[in-house]
Image (tube, helix red, strand yellow):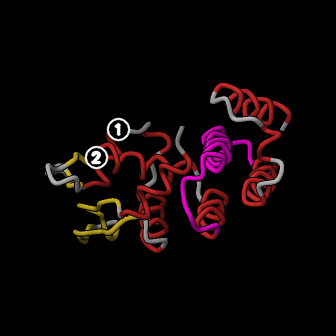
């Protein structure tokens, strides 16, 4: 926990954000406190990084509504590193359009197979990945555009991030 807090303090200092200026910011104090409680319950580096980034991004005031910060922290607490990996992978498949919108690259392989090939095989479980997709979809972070049946059950062929999913990734990224 001390190491997590030291990294946080170092990052705030790098960004020239004075902790003294944040002492009266109720939103920052709430996010910091909630993040510390979640960090105490986790050993997974990806989650600890996400929490650290969430606190830093709260200091930057990314969102106007305090509830967004709390909702996203709840997601960090509930999600595994796989949830974050899948969301980041979907983000990496996007490319900007000329009008400022976002589109997805068209890839022929089913998305679950693409993920299987990218991440270590010993960590991949198709049933678990389907649950990850269900979780992030039910939170409104992705829309699943193509779902197909296989011998092992449903397989996600195409999915894309929603604006809420992009905002979540911005919240937990440096």
Instruction: Reply above or below: 52 against 13.
Output: below
Please tell me which residue is depicted at 32% across the width and 43% down the height of the picture. Answer: 92
Please provide the residue range marked out in magenta.
Answer: 41-66
Residue 85 image label: none
Give the labeled residue for mark 1: 118
SS label for mark 1: helix
Please tell me which residue is depicted at 50% across the width and 43% down the height of the picture. Answer: 123
Image quarter hosting the C terminus: top right
Residue 25 is situated, as x and y percent measured from the top left of the image, at 77, 55
Of the pair 140 and 114, the residue shown nearer to us: 140
SS label for mark 2: helix
Instruction: Reply above or below: 70 against 7.
Output: below
**Secondary structure mainly formed by the magenta segment:** helix
Of the pair 62 and 160, the residue shown nearer to us: 62
Please state if 99 lies on the left or on the right of 129 as rendered: left
Q: Callout 1: few (<14), some (14-19), or many (20+) C-alpha neighbours within 10 Å?
A: few
Whole-angstrom CA distance, mark 1 to mark 2, is: 6 Å
Residue 126 is situated, as x and y percent measured from the top left of the image, at 41, 57
Residue 131 is situated, as x and y percent measured from the top left of the image, at 47, 66
Q: Quadrant of residue 49?
A: top right
Residue 114 image label: 2
In contact (CB < 8 Å): disc 1 and disc 2: yes
Of the pair 164 and 41, the residue shown nearer to us: 164
Q: Callout 2: few (<14), some (14-19), or many (20+) C-alpha neighbours within 10 Å?
A: some
Residue 115 is situated, as x and y percent measured from the top left of the image, at 34, 47
Please tell me which residue is depicted at 62% across the width and 62% down the height of the picture. Answer: 69
């Amino acid at each position: 926990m001390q190491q997590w807090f030291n990294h946080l303090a170092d990052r705030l200092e790098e960004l020239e954000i004075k902790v003294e200026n944040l002492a009266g910011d109720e939103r920052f104090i709430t996010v910091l406190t909630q993040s510390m409680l979640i960090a105490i319950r986790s050993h997974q580096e990806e989650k600890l990084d996400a929490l650290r980034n969430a606190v830093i991004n709260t200091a930057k005031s990314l969102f106007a509504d305090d509830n967004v910060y709390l909702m996203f922290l709840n997601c960090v607490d509930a999600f595994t590193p796989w949830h974050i990996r899948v969301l980041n992978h979907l983000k990496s498949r996007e490319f900007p359009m000329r009008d400022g919108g976002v589109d997805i690259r068209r890839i022929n392989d089913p998305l679950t197979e693409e993920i299987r090939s990218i991440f270590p095989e010993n960590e991949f479980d198709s049933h678990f990945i389907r649950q990850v997709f269900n979780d992030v979809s039910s939170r409104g972070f992705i829309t699943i555009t193509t779902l197909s049946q296989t011998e092992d059950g449903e397989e996600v062929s195409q999915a894309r991030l929603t604006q809420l999913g992009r905002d979540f990734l911005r919240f937990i990224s440096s």
